[in-house]
Image (cartoon, rainbow, N blue to C red):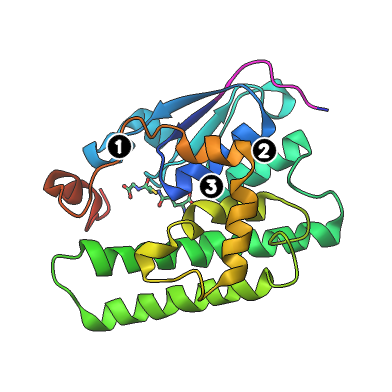
Amino acid sequence: MTTQTKPIDAYSLPTPNGQKVHIMLEELGVPWTYHRIDIGKGQQFTPEFLAISPNNKIPAIVDPEGPGGEPISIFESGAILKYLGLKFGQFYPTDARAQVKVDEWLFWQVGGFGPMLGQNNHFSVYAPEKVPYAIKRYSDETHRLFGVLNKQLADSEYIAGDYSIADIASIGWAQSWERYGITQQDFPHVHAWLERVGARPAVARGLAYGKDIPNHDLANDKEAQKVLFNQRAR
Ligand SMILES: N[C@@H](CCC(=O)N[C@@H](CS)C(=O)NCC(=O)O)C(=O)O
């Protein structure tokens, strides 16, 4: 079993994308240090942060004990989860077929469930003009994706076989179902799963991590909106 001597540095925030990494690190029980990157204030654009996260987004990690004993930096939550799962041999299977299952649902989350719910939030809550077409498009897609997850969980306790990084990736997004106008009755298997994974102490700790400082209230914080919305290449 791999042991971690020096803490892993996590550059993050308690958003659904950051929470994936917080949950994973708590599940692994390895030493880690939280570095708050205030994206509403533009801290994602400093040269130091861009050097480890060129897409100017949290989460990113630096493992001082990377491959060959040398430090490694990683951006993109899916890549971070896979790296940690492989390094510590936990929450990511060793069997090739089982790995494909986990990868499918991990990529489903990072390519679909997260971005589409994010766009839904943007057009339903944050956009200064309410564009009915965009709101309907992303609300429908949110509903469809929750339906896909619900079907997947109808016959299994976890998303892709045993509890894995596929579950860890989706928890933070799925738990905010209410904001998408979804009821417990709509997707009962998703709710049963959220209760199951929510009962894990590491999940509770990972979801709570960093919340002592509230995130920006993006619906009303005009300064944060200026930083985060309508970015163009710099
Ligand atoms: N695909 C990325 C998405 C990360 C992401 O969207 N991060 C947001 C916060 S949840 C961010 O840092 N936004 C800052 C910005 O857009 O400037 C991942 O999964 O890591």
Marks 3 and 1 sit apart, C-alpha to C-alpha, by: 21 Å
* Residue 162 percent coordinates (x, y): 78, 54
Q: Residue furthest front?
A: 185
Marks 2 and 3 sit apart, C-alpha to C-alpha, by: 11 Å
The residue range painted magenta reads 2-8
Q: Residue furthest top?
A: 5
The amino acid sitting under disc 1 is Pro
Q: Quadrant of the N terminus?
A: top right
**Quadrant of res 204:** top right
Q: Main secondary structure of the magenta part?
A: loop
The amino acid sitting under disc 2 is Leu
Whether 3 is among the magenta residues is yes
Residue, disc 2: 84
- Label 3 SS: helix
Q: Nearer the viewer, residue 160 or 55?
A: 160
The numbered mark, 3 or 1, whose residue comes first in the sequence reads 3
Residue, disc 3: 77
* Residue 217 percent coordinates (x, y): 23, 47
Q: Residues within 10 Å of mark 3 (few under 14, many from 20)?
A: many
Q: Residues within 10 Å of mark 1 (few under 14, many from 20)?
A: few
Marks 2 and 1 sit apart, C-alpha to C-alpha, by: 27 Å
